[in-house]
Image (cartoon, helix red, strand yellow):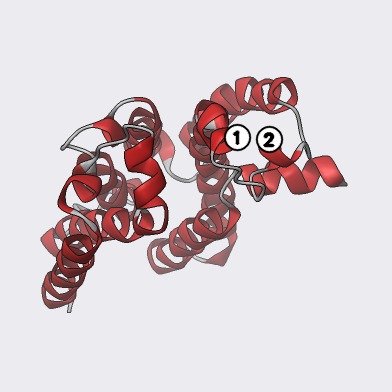
Amino acid sequence: MNKVRGLLQASHFIPTLIVSSIAFAFGVHYWWEGPAYVIAFTVFTGQLVVGWSNDLYDFADDQRHGRMNKPLVSGLISKEYLRNWLIFMVPFSFIANLLGPLGFKGGLLYWLGIGCGVAYNFYFKFNIFSPLPFAVAFAALPSCIAISKSVTPPTWMWLGGAILGCAAHFVNVIKDMDQDRESAIKGLPQRIGKRASIAVAAALVLIAVVIIF
């Protein structure tokens, strides 16, 4: 049971649950509840890949800063255990998304978003283009569900999603910004500082609301 809890914690469970819930809502809109549950599940598996790869890559830094809420640092699970699950989940999630209701095109688009999430973990969070993976991933999530029903995603969907993704990035890094700077993690929010990041995030949310509504 502890290992299951550790896997869920390493997935960044609350953001993963939020993303999966959004996928379910769009699944109900474009399909119906039955396929929506499957879509939410396959999307959930993709989010596991992003979260687990993040915790594995950040282990040394999390250890350095004493982040005991991270299951690898607290010893709830081991790096080998998490790595083995990640090795299993990558092909499982990829195939599940392509063979599920999202289909080939929708599944590939969703996995473009997952690839962006992983690329952020390993590369983009260190440079000024750090918002880019969030923009692509947030735009891809609702759009891939629309595409699964052969619907061209409307402008408000992908553009609003992209802008909200950027806002989420600025908000997400604020709490660890000082520690990130110590670790030479210099994404765009870290470069402009906390106050500017809050202002940018608020402006982006306002713009997204105007576009979507």
Residue 197: x, y in percent? Answer: 21, 60
At 15% across and 52% down in the image, what residue appears? 192
The residue closer to the viewer here, 82 or 149, is 82
Q: Kindly identify which numbered label has been placed on residue 63.
A: 1
Residue, disc 2: 72
Residue 183: x, y in percent? Answer: 38, 33
Specify whether 96 is left or right of 28.
right
At 88% across and 47% down in the image, what residue appears? 1
At 55% across and 37% down in the image, what residue appears? 62
The residue closer to the viewer here, 30 or 159, is 159
Say which element carries label 2.
helix
Categorize mark 2 by other alpha carbons within 10 Å: few (<14), some (14-19), many (20+): many
Say which element carries label 1.
helix
Q: In whole angstroms, how far apart are the C-alphas of marks 2 and 1?
A: 9 Å
Residue 10: x, y in percent? Answer: 62, 42
**Residues tagged 2 and 1 counted as in contact (Cβ below 8 A):** yes
The residue closer to the viewer here, 123 or 65, is 65
